Image: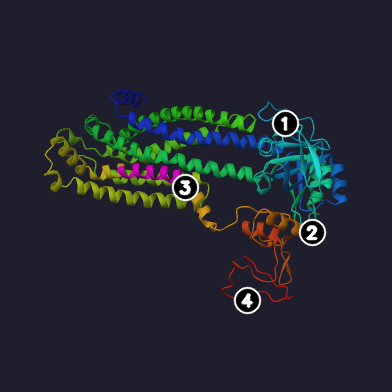
């Protein structure tokens, strides 16, 4: 150990290990910063799971709950009710699609709503939900409708007063109903709006909180009586979209951070190869003095392990500091403090650093034990042979294992590794061929500038190692550009998928007795060509007389499609812009449907 420490100090002063140490620090800092941040957010979700649900237990249904459920949930503990649907909010001449959530005054049972007296004003926890006859609006809805606190807006047939600006809703989830800005109102005011009619898309919520034993008993009782379109969310199953999104983001960022490890691994391999070349003579002298192969491996192995541990520790410290900067911004957005991370991300970061070091540095180091003592007299003996490709092969194998581990999915990991490997091979072949061509004797002999000529000749002399460096840098730049362009490409692809003549305005929820009035409204304003299509809600219940259940399918998408409600339409003849290319149109009274 003492000899390895002296060797480490000497080699550090000579500058031979600094590039290797910097590469390790960057790789560990990149990976650990993502791991630390993901761990903190995950721990915050576990800590605040009941606040994300708004209760300890949530029941969701696409139809009103029966009196039996209301009676049992009342006996289980404290409970609250909510109804959620989409509608237009109207203030003077301005309209805006809004997500309406009607709640009882004791909502939420866990967590707190936060409201402000005006947009941009300082908010505070609300003591209770909106009172009857009032609504709370999100700030963007206040701006869209020009409806400050104290003004009145109309929801269907009811006119309600804006009592506060809603700044935080603990249970807000990321689905279609919550894309529109929120209007929160009292549940007893819903009937006066007249907005809920047969076929309306409405979600009915029951919230429960209290002692675990009666809640567990109620959950068991309720699960046995749930029907299609109803479900129960608890602290373990509730808000899976939040956890899934965070897990996907953590894997994505982790794979992105490992791109730094790709470049770090190449730097480690090149630095180690240079280190080995410069220590061949010293190892030969040590062999003459009686050092065995095992002794040399132990000395240099301990030296590199000490360097790796120190560099990984510095990288961990930098990664820990970097995630704190991002966490501070997240805390201000989430309005909640994040717990301190556990020790696991630190151990993962140390493991990444040591694995990179062993994967890329160990194969070249093992060549030192094969240096013969005769090299003291003959410098041409004992030179490393075939070490470059062997070192890179071992290192890339190690890196592939890291990528599969970080992906968290074997198929995704193999896909990423395969893509990186193919790109690396193509970049290496192309760069090697270009270097050979540009630095060929035919080209070099015609260059008059000596510096430039010697530089090209040196590139040709070390064409393989230079090609590896060029390929590694190309892979890193490709990944960065891919991340940059992916977002815009996805948006452009979505825009291209829509026809050029697709409508850009939709009127939803027109009732049969309102069609003529709406047509007259359009005609008076010179708007022609509007199509009115009937729309009803439906659910698949049976196929060929056999009842259908989500339990019949293994695929998650199939389960969702079976369980969800569909928009169904009907008409006597096909629309003018549709063309039947095969088959025939429906026969009257044949009870036929078409499916996407």
Span colored in magenta: 470-488
Circle nearer the N terminus (2, 4): 2
Whether the residues at callouts 2 and 4 have beta carbons within 8 Å, the answer is no
x, y (%) of residue 188? 84, 42
**Residue 385 position (above or below residue 331):** below
Which residue was labeled with disc 4? 584
Of badges 3 and 1, nearer the viewer stands: 1
Which residue was labeled with disc 3? 486
Of badges 2 and 4, nearer the viewer stands: 2
Question: CA gap, disc 3 to disc 1?
Answer: 38 Å
| 456 in the magenta segment | no
Circle nearer the N terminus (1, 2): 1
Residue 513 image label: 2
Number of on-image labels: 4
Circle nearer the N terminus (3, 1): 1
Residue at screen point 33% across, 23% down: 9
Residue 115 image label: 1
**Element assignment for label 1:** strand
Of badges 1 and 2, nearer the viewer stands: 2
x, y (%) of residue 47? 67, 34
């Amino acid at each position: 150990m003492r000899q390895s420490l002296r060797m480490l100090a000497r080699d550090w002063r000579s500058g031979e290990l600094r590039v290797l140490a910097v590469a390790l620090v960057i790789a560990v800092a990149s990976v650990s910063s993502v791991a630390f941040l993901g761990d903190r957010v995950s721990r915050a979700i576990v800590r605040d799971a009941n606040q994300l649900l708004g209760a300890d237990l949530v029941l969701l249904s696409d139809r009103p709950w029966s009196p039996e459920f209301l009676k049992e949930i009342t006996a289980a503990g404290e409970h609250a009710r909510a109804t959620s649907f989409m509608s237009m909010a109207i203030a003077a001449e301005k309209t805006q699609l809004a997500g309406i959530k009607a709640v009882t005054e004791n909502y939420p049972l866990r967590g707190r709503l936060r409201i402000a007296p005006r947009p941009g004003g300082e908010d505070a926890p609300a003591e209770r939900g909106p009172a009857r006859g009032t609504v709370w609006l999100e700030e963007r809805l206040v701006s869209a409708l020009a409806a400050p606190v104290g003004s009145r807006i109309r929801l269907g047939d009811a006119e309600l007063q804006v009592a506060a600006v809603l700044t935080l809703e603990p249970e807000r989830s990321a689905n279609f109903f919550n894309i529109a800005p929120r209007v929160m109102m009292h549940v007893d005011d819903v009937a006066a709006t007249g907005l809920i009619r047969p076929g309306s898309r409405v979600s009915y919520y029951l919230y429960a909180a209290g002692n675990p034993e009666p809640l567990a008993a109620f959950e068991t009782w309720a699960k046995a009586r749930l029907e299609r379109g109803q479900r129960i969310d608890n602290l373990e199953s509730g808000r899976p979209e939040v956890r899934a999104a965070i897990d996907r983001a953590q894997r994505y960022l982790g794979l992105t951070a490992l791109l730094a490890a790709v470049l770090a691994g190449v730097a480690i391999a090149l630095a180690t190869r240079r280190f080995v070349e410069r220590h061949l003579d010293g190892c030969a002298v040590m062999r003459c003095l009686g050092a065995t192969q095992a002794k040399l491996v132990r000395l240099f192995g301990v030296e590199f392990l000490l360097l790796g541990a120190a560099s990984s520790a510095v990288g961990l410290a930098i990664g820990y500091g970097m995630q704190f900067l991002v966490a501070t911004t997240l805390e201000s957005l989430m309005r909640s403090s994040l717990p301190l991370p556990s020790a696991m991300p630190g151990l993962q970061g140390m493991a990444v650093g040591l694995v990179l070091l062993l994967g890329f540095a160990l194969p070249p180091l093992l060549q030192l034990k094969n240096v013969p003592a005769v090299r003291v007299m003959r410098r041409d003996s004992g030179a490393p042979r075939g070490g470059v490709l062997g070192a890179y092969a071992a290192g890339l194998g190690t890196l592939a294992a890291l990528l599969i581990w970080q992906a968290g999915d074997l198929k995704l990991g193999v896909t990423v590794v395969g893509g990186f490997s193919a790109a690396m091979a193509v970049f290496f072949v192309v760069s090697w061929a270009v270097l050979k061509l540009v630095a060929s004797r035919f080209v070099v002999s015609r260059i008059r500038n000596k510096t430039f000529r010697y530089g090209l000749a040196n590139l040709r002399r070390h064409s393989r190692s230079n090609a590896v460096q060029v390929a590694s840098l190309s892979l890193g730049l490709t990944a960065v550009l891919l991340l940059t362009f992916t977002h815009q490409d996805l948006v452009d692809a979505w825009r291209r998928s829509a026809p050029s003549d697709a409508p850009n305005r939709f009127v939803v929820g027109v009732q049969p007795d309102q069609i003529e009035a709406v047509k007259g409204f359009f005609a008076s304003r010179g708007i022609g060509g509007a199509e009115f299509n009937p729309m009803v809600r439906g659910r698949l219940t049976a196929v060929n007389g056999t009842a259908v259940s989500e339990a019949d399918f293994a695929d998650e998408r199939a389960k969702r499609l079976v369980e969800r409600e569909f928009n169904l339409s009907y008409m006597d003849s096909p629309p003018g812009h549709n063309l039947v290319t095969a088959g025939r149109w429906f026969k009257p009274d044949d009870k036929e449907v078409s499916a996407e």
